[in-house]
């Protein structure tokens, strides 16, 4: 059984969005004002800053770009109690101890990766993120 390894994994705290509990705009189908989030979950991940996914035009309109990505092993996500990472989930901290950085990053795109035959599907999840800094949201960890 082949399991991919992460390069220099560090702890990342994720707050998944609870879509079923959030007030949703009927037209845009997005949470409005205060989104309800699950408790923070810490997962080991590989971070890549500056990996730019530029704004692109698609059939449905403009697709949002990203400032970097977090690469998770599905095995680690399941061990932490997360079934999946979704668009609009929030990343609130990266690192641990004196090197811990509080952030306010939002997942804008998710890619399934690392399709090995003995895994029966994707073994990695790449979550592209963007720092949206919403005006009505506290910075992560504060």
Image (cartoon, rainbow, N blue to C red):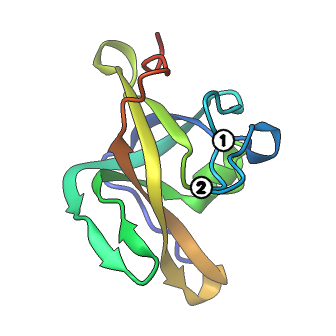
The percent position of residue 85, horizontal first and vertical second, equals 59, 54
Residue drawn at (52%, 38%) of the image: 90
Q: Nearer the viewer, residue 116 or 24?
A: 24
Q: Nearer the viewer, residue 110 or 126?
A: 110
Could you say whether the residue bearing mark 2 is in a helix, strand or loop?
loop
Could you say whether the residue bearing mark 1 is in a helix, strand or loop?
loop
Residue drawn at (62%, 85%) of the image: 118
Taking the image as drawn, is residue 114 in sight?
yes
Residue drawn at (31%, 76%) of the image: 57
Taking the image as drawn, is residue 126 in sight?
no
Q: Where 128 sits versus 136, above or below? A: below
Which residue is at the far front? Answer: 27
Q: Nearer the viewer, residue 35 or 47?
A: 35
Please report contact status of discs 1 and 2: CB closer than 8 Å, yes or no.
Answer: yes
Numbered mark located on residue 85 in the image:
none
Residue that badge 1 annotates = 17
The percent position of residue 58, horizontal first and vertical second, equals 37, 80
Quadrant assignment, res 5: bottom left
Quadrant assignment, res 133: top left
Locate residue 59 relative to residue 48 in the image: left or right: right
The percent position of residue 32, horizontal first and vertical second, equals 63, 37
Which residue is at the far bottom? Answer: 117
The percent position of residue 61, horizontal first and vertical second, equals 40, 73
Residue that badge 2 annotates = 86
Q: Where 102 sits versus 127, above or below? A: above
Q: Quadrant of the N terminus?
A: bottom right
Give the mark nearer the N terminus: 1 vs 2. Answer: 1
């Amino acid at each position: 059984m082949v399991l991919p390894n992460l390069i220099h994994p560090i702890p990342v705290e994720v707050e998944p969005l609870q879509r079923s509990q959030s007030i949703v705009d009927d037209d845009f189908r997005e949470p409005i004002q205060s989104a309800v989030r699950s408790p923070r979950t810490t997962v080991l991940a590989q971070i890549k800053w500056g990996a730019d996914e530029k704004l692109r035009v698609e059939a449905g309109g403009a697709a949002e770009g990203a400032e970097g990505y977090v690469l998770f092993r599905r095995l680690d996500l399941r061990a932490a109690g997360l079934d999946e990472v979704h668009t609009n989930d929030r990343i609130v901290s990266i690192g641990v101890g004196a090197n811990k950085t509080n952030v306010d990053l939002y997942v804008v795109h998710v890619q399934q990766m690392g399709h090995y035959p003995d895994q029966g599907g994707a073994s990695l999840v790449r979550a592209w993120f963007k720092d949206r800094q919403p005006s009505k949201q506290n910075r992560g960890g504060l």
